[in-house]
């Protein structure tokens, strides 16, 4: 069995724009920063990367160029926000050809399938690829979540090896760790829950704030991996105001603003999202200064 790529610190990478086009020079700079800071993997074109706002050409070109630039230094995971089973399968067919390492796949959004539908949908996803698939639970955006029984059944599929949990159920790993295969990893998708999720059996964090504070977020995951919860708690307490500042508006508005403040990219963001309000920017700048970034 292949080593599970979903562990430790995984950055949900922003997508930089300039003049309404993807800014690939800034993207390469962002990727360099992440790799040098010791992240374990990168998600490209996820929700933080505005993947659902990209047209098809932009989506596949972004993933292709990011994968080529990373050049196997860390695993590259393509975000896949789906609206139907057939839509997902069409995208996966092309993703299989791009040299990526994994796919982060949401349930079809808005449709709100029943649990039987989720199982049937992800069986087809599993059968359509040999890449490692991480399920993405974000019921606040998709309108549906995985039940415990559904997760246990989905974990039996050979290519479904992890869960990104962006919901509020922090007890999920406690309930499921002994019921899931040992190779199946659960990760939080909420920076603020990184410590408690790990304490409950989680194996890492798909992080937003690591776009601008990768060293601190990597150190936090290293503490958690080593069982040093005292140091992890101290660092998490320091990071909490930064989380609050960057999530004052809908993600990725705040983190895009933070990256722009550090001149990692422009303030451009795809409609219907809009640039951060002045008060949000002021709060972010205050926190960046406290971390010695400005």
Image (spheres, rainbow, N blue to C red):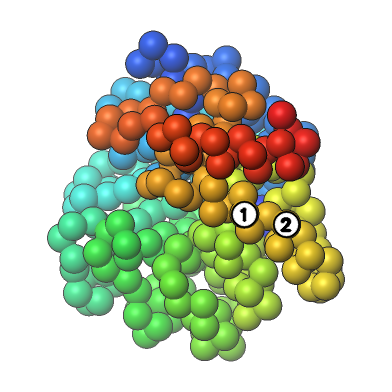
Q: Secondary structure at mark 1?
A: helix
Task: From this view, report whether residue 57 is shown above or below residue 229.
Answer: above
**Front-most of 59 and 285?**
285
Q: Quadrant of the N terminus?
A: bottom right
Name, please, the residue furthest toward the left: 111
Image coords of residue 211 (percent x, y): 61, 39
Q: Quadrant of the C terminus?
A: top right
Residue under numbered circle 2: 238
Determine which of the numbered discs, if any, sits on residue 37 in the image: none
Q: Residue at x 37, y 85 (%)?
A: 149
Residue 189 versus residue 126: which sits nearer the camera?
189
Mark yes or no: residue 247 visible. Answer: yes
- Evaluate whether residue 65 shows in this view: no
Q: Quadrant of residue 268?
A: top left
Instruction: Name which residue lies at 71% across and 36% down.
Output: 289
Q: Which residue is mark 1?
A: 241
Name the element at disc 2: helix
Task: Tell me whether the residue at label 1 lies in contact with that at label 2, contact meaning CB atoms closer than 8 angstroms.
Answer: yes
Pointer 1 local density, CA inside 10 Å: few below 14, some 14–19, many at least 20: some
């Amino acid at each position: 069995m292949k080593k599970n790529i979903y562990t430790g610190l995984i950055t949900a990478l922003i997508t930089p724009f300039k003049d309404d086009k993807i800014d690939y020079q800034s993207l390469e700079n962002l990727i360099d920063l992440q790799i040098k800071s010791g992240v374990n993997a990168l998600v490209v074109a996820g929700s933080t990367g505005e993947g659902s706002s990209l047209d098809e050409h932009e989506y596949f070109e972004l993933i292709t160029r990011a994968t080529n630039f990373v050049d196997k230094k860390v695993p590259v995971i393509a975000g896949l926000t789906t609206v139907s089973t057939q839509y997902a399968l069409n995208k996966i067919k092309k993703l299989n050809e791009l040299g990526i390492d994994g796919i982060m796949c949401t349930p079809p959004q808005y449709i709100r399938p029943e649990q039987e539908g989720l199982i049937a949908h992800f069986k087809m996803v599993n059968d359509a690829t040999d890449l490692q698939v991480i399920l993405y639970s974000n019921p606040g955006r998709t309108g549906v979540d995985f039940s415990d029984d559904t997760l246990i059944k989905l974990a039996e599929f050979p290519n479904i090896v992890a869960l990104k949990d962006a919901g509020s159920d922090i007890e999920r790993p406690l309930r499921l760790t002994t019921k899931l295969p040992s190779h199946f990893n659960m990760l939080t998708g909420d920076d603020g829950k990184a410590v408690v999720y790990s304490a409950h059996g989680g194996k890492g964090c798909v992080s937003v704030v690591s776009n601008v504070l990768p060293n601190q977020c990597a150190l936090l995951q290293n503490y958690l991996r080593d069982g040093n919860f005292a140091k992890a708690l101290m660092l998490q307490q320091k990071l909490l105001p930064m989380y609050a500042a960057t999530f004052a508006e809908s993600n990725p508005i705040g983190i895009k603003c933070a990256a722009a403040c550090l001149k990692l990219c422009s303030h451009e963001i795809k409609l219907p999202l809009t640039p951060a309000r002045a008060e949000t920017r002021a709060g972010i700048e205050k926190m960046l200064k406290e971390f010695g970034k400005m």
